[in-house]
Image (cartoon, rainbow, N blue to C red):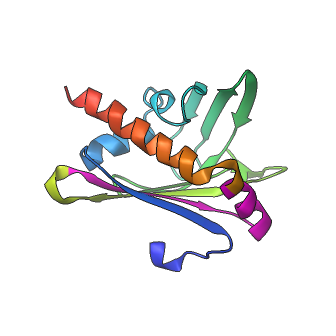
Amino acid sequence: MTSDLNPLTDLSLTRTLAVPRQLVWDCWTMAVHIPHFFVPAPHKVTSVDIDLRVGGRFNTTFNIDGTIVENKGVYLDVQPTEKLVFTDSYTEGWKPAADPFMTAIMLFADAPGGGTIYTAIARHRSRETCKSHEDMGFFDGWGTAATQLETYAKGLMS
């Protein structure tokens, strides 16, 4: 999957997380876990609505410095413990979004020692949208979210 990246429209981040793949999967697919890692602190996820199936919803609401941001999306691919693909190009019922931003591809693989090789890919419709996302802080933001995910998941192992 990562070999077909387009450097003009795709951003990618890979980390090895010191938590089992099943636990990373659970954090990404259960609404109760999403608020603990999905956006970089001090920003907050205030609501999550997941219907984990192809065509099902992945809706989140954020509070970013007092501004409420609703993000409605749909799952395009669900391969348990291996891959999640969701987009804001559509909402549930395959209704096209007015102003889509990206498609996210989350890949999970076993790492030596029981960890997870975690890859987050953001695909964009245009070079301009990709550049905008990079300038917004894709690498810092998604990197921070990956660190928050690892820290949170480690706490679930206790």
**In the image, residue 37 above or below residue 130:** above
Residue nearer the viewer, 78 or 123: 123
45 sits left or right of 129 in the view: left
Q: Quadrant of residue 123?
A: bottom right
**Residue placed at 72% from the left, 33% from the top?**
70
- Whether residue 101 appears in this view of the structure is yes
Which quadrant is home to the C terminus?
top left
70 sits left or right of 150 in the view: right
- On whether residue 124 falls in the magenta region, the answer is yes
Where does the image place residue 101, in percent across and percent down from the top left?
A: 73, 54
**Residue placed at 65% from the left, 29% from the top?**
62
**Residue placed at 55% from the left, 53% from the top?**
139
Residue nearer the viewer, 70 or 135: 135
67 sits left or right of 106 in the view: right
Where does the image place residue 102, in percent across and percent down from the top left?
A: 68, 56
- Whether residue 94 appears in this view of the structure is no
- On whether residue 83 falls in the magenta region, the answer is no
Where does the image place residue 27, in percent across and percent down from the top left?
A: 39, 37
**Residue placed at 48% from the left, 30% from the top?**
31
User: What is the magenta range?
Assistant: 115-134
